[in-house]
Image (cartoon, rainbow, N blue to C red):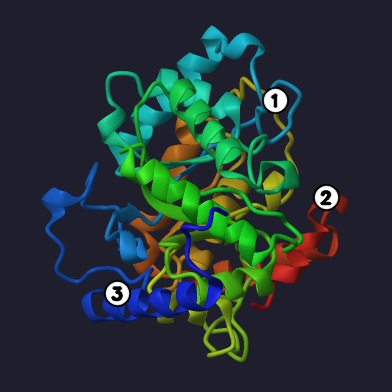
Amino acid sequence: MTERHIGRRQFVREGSALVAAAAATGSAGGSEAAETDTKKILNHNPKMHYRRLGKTDLMLSEVSLGGHWKNRGGGRYWGSFAKDEVPDDVGKNRTEVISACIDVGINYLDITTSAECCAYGVALKGRREQMIVGADDCNICPRQRQNCNVEALSRGVEGCLRRLQTDYLDIWRPQMDMGGRNSDDDVKVVIETFQKLHEAGKVRHLGMSNHHRDWTKHVIETFPQFEMFIFPCTAKTKEKDKPPTKENVTGGNSEHSVFEAIRKHDVGLVTIKPYSGGSLFKIKAKFPVMGVGSKEENDLARLTLQCILTNDAITAAVPGLTTVYEVENAARASYTRALGMTPRQRQWLARVTDEHWQQLPDEYRWLRDWEII
């Protein structure tokens, strides 16, 4: 940090004033606006439900698009392309998926890798204004200590812009250390970088992606400059001190919860890992994925999203979607959410989710830390 920047006490003091101003002008982050001008909602579809993304005042489709999709080895994401060149079949697939998203009313895209930037740059060519884009490059982000400086973080954003073939991001949502090991000074560097990029017209809103509950809550309560957060939620996730309900097989509400901090500070919330990185499903697939999959797994995907979205602190869930059918199935989670689940569906979802929870693969056992938050 340079000497011209404020100290921590003044930083927090001024931040508190921003929170008070936001509270006076807006509602809780994930609440669905009762009287919203639908003409102002991007890709509005009357069957889709939209929620306000906290202090950004952006209206997001409650089911949106995660940047990941199945790769050729059956993995959950694409990391990079040689020379940033997008294979023809990948470009075609992502273009078709984006078109389907626009048709069903999805309006937010969340990106985390350089390959995703490249592929969605192809898919959005000529229609950039039809999606709200949140992005960061996981290879140049504050997860790595050497990147916790304005120069490196700015370079990461510039790379995203170049690969996306755009001159701005709607949301820059840097990915912080998953173990909560970033310092407050690291966070201040992120804010300084955002201010520089925002003044240059390259970034409109500031968010953060993190996988550590206590650290996430600390940042929400300490740094009002952050307008939205990204963290994982599954069908097992519930808030502290609230028992399950018939609407959500797991639960939620407590002043000690991260969700309560989200509401109190008017921070938007986009949740990831609804399917535990795809490990929820038994049928494995590789790109290109053929067919529409089994009815059981499509039902599981849809009901899982419905369960997650019963929490009003959540603005949107962003599953990774590989095919047009997966887009349409995910959208139906919002279309039919008001109908609720039948008793049989609730029981089945709870049983399948519990069974999966006990058999989480090693790489996703950390999700258990996000069961009661």
**At which x and y percent is residue 285?**
70, 30
- Residue 104: image location, x then y, percent: 31, 41
Q: In this view, does 176 lie to the left or right of 339?
A: right
Residue hosting label 3: 22
Can residue 291 be seen? no
The local crowd at label 1, few if under 14, some if 14 to 19, many if 20 or more residues have their Cα within 10 Å, is: some
Furthest toward the right, the residue is: 362
Numbered mark located on residue 306 in the image = none
Mark with earlier residue (2, 3): 3
On the picture, is 82 further left or further right than 106?
right
Q: Nearer the viewer, residue 112 or 345?
A: 112
**Residue 225: image location, x then y, percent:** 42, 64
Quadrant in which the C terminus is drawn: bottom right
Badge 1 amino acid: Lys
Which residue is farthest front?
3
Cβ atoms under marks 1 and 3 closer than 8 Å: no
> For the residue marked with disc 2, what is the amino acid?
Glu
Q: How crowded is mark 2: few (under 14 residues within 10 Å), some or many (20 or more)?
A: few
Which residue is at a point 62% across and 86% down the rendered structure image? 240
Reading the image, the residue beneath label 2 is 363
Query: Of the residues tagged 1 and 2, which is closer to the observer?
Result: 2
User: Where's residue 60, x and y in %?
Assistant: 33, 53
Q: Name the residue under label 1.
A: 286
Residue at 22% of width from left, 47% of height from top?
Answer: 44
Tell me the distance, in whole angstroms, between the alpha carbons under discs 2 and 3. Answer: 38 Å
Ranked by sequence position, the earlier of labels 1 and 3 is: 3
Residue at position x 41%, y 74% in the image: 15
User: Which label's residue is closer to the chain start, 1 or 2?
Assistant: 1
The N terminus appears in which quarter of the rendering? bottom right
